Amino acid sequence: MMWHFKKRAKRALGDESGYTLLELLVVLVILTLIVGIAGPVVLRQFGKAKADTARIEVNRLVTDLEFFRVDVGRFPTDAEGLSGLLSQPADAAGWSGPYLPKASQAVDPWGNAYIYDVSDDGQSVVVSSLGADGAAGGTGENADISSDS
């Protein structure tokens, strides 16, 4: 009885037992074309996501600086910088931080520290990132991101 089923299975499969080299090469060419076309698009979106993340973090840092100002009565000085959000400055009575849970939140998505600048009168602050290239100016992923723009 078992012999009958084996014979029927062999007949159903025929002589096809695998893929030919030509079929495998065609599939590889198609996959290479898909990766070649889709790859740059995905990488562009990844760079845009970093810029969007930096823009959100810059605004969050400004909000954290406002909380510092409400508690202490002033923004951190240029010397204190964003580290004033992490640990209490010497003359910051009323400080109820840390306003940032981790020091890594003071670093942009490209690994550079955010730039902090307080106005001469101490009434406004600007937090910025120089983008992917770490240099002033640029376009696209290299564009500067600032809280005053």
Image (cartoon, helix red, strand yellow):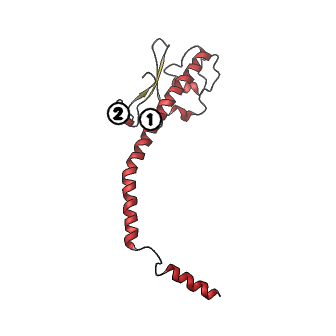
- Total numbered labels placed on residues in the image: 2
Q: Horizontal placement of 134 versus 105: left or right?
A: left
Q: Where residue 34 appears, x then y in whole percent?
A: 39, 55
Looking at the rendered image, the quarter that the C terminus falls into is top left
Q: Residue furthest left?
A: 138
Residue type, numbered disc 1: Ala
- Can you say whether 25 is above or below 147 in the image? below
| Front one among 136 and 25 | 25
Query: What residue sits 49% from the left and 34% below the top?
Result: 53
Query: What residue sits 60% from the left and 26% below the top?
Result: 99
| Res 19 seen here | yes
Instruction: Tell me which label, 2 or 1, sits earlier in the chain.
Output: 1
Residue at mark 2: 139
Label 1: how many Cα within 10 Å (few below 14, some 14–19, many 20+): many
Query: What residue sits 52% from the left and 23% below the top?
Result: 62
Please tell me in which quadrant of the rendered image residue 100 appears: top right
Query: What residue sits 47% from the left and 11% below the top?
Result: 121
Residue at mark 1: 51
Please tell me in which quadrant of the rendered image residue 74 appears: top right
What is the secondary structure assignment of the residue under circle 1? helix
Q: Horizontal placement of 87 versus 46: left or right?
A: right
Q: CA distance from mark 2 to mark 1?
A: 11 Å
Residue type, numbered disc 2: Thr
Please tell me in which quadrant of the rendered image residue 112 appears: top left
Label 2: how many Cα within 10 Å (few below 14, some 14–19, many 20+): few
Q: Where residue 140 appears, x then y in whole percent?
A: 37, 35
Q: Where residue 1 appears, x then y in whole percent?
A: 65, 88
What is the secondary structure assignment of the residue under circle 2? loop
